[in-house]
Amino acid sequence: MNIVSTSDLYESCYYLINGCTLEGVETLQVGSKTVCQLSFQGKDIYDLRDEYLRGDSIVNLTNFRTAYSKLLQTTYFAKKEHSKKFKSGLGGIQ
């Protein structure tokens, strides 16, 4: 199973528009910020990661924009849910 995880939304969009599937979203509390770690699976994902990191990635902007909107919404709801759990956990300590 080829899986790559990243918190970079642009990189995530690149995976989505090249046929990879979003397998999971993990929220992490880093200081005062909540960060989403997105995991993707795909046959050529390691090649795609290398292309992206080398700066060799080329995308259709319409497809990129659609993927970006989808991932913004996904991370928004994940952070919102994380915030609810985080706040209720702190409330239980006091």
Image (cartoon, rainbow, N blue to C red):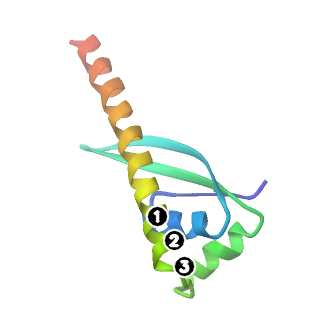
Residue 50, quarter of the rendered image: bottom right
- The amino acid type found where label 1 is placed reads Thr
Instruction: Identify the residue position indicated by label 1 in the image.
Output: 66
Residue for point 47% across, 74% down: 62
Circle 2/circle 1 CB separation < 8 Å: yes
- The amino acid type found where label 3 is placed reads Leu
Q: What element carries label 2?
A: helix
Residue for point 55% across, 85% down: 58
Q: Which is nearer the eye, 94 or 88?
A: 88
Q: Is residue 4 above or below residue 78?
A: below
Instruction: Identify the residue position indicated by label 2 in the image.
Output: 63
Specify few, some or many for label 3: CA neighbours under 10 Å numbering under 14, 14-19, or 20 or more.
few
Residue for point 46% across, 64% down: 66
- Figure label count: 3
Q: Is mark 3 on a helix, strand or loop?
A: helix
Instruction: Identify the residue position indicated by label 3 in the image.
Output: 53
Q: Which is nearer the eye, 14 or 64?
A: 64
Answer with mark 2 or mark 3, whichever residue precedes in sequence: 3
Residue 3, quarter of the rendered image: bottom right
Q: Is residue 54 left or right of residue 43?
A: left
Answer with mark 3 or mark 1, whichever residue precedes in sequence: 3
- Residue 92 place in picture, x, y as percent: 28, 11
- Residue 55 place in picture, x, y as percent: 52, 86
Q: Which residue lies furthest to the left in this view?
A: 94
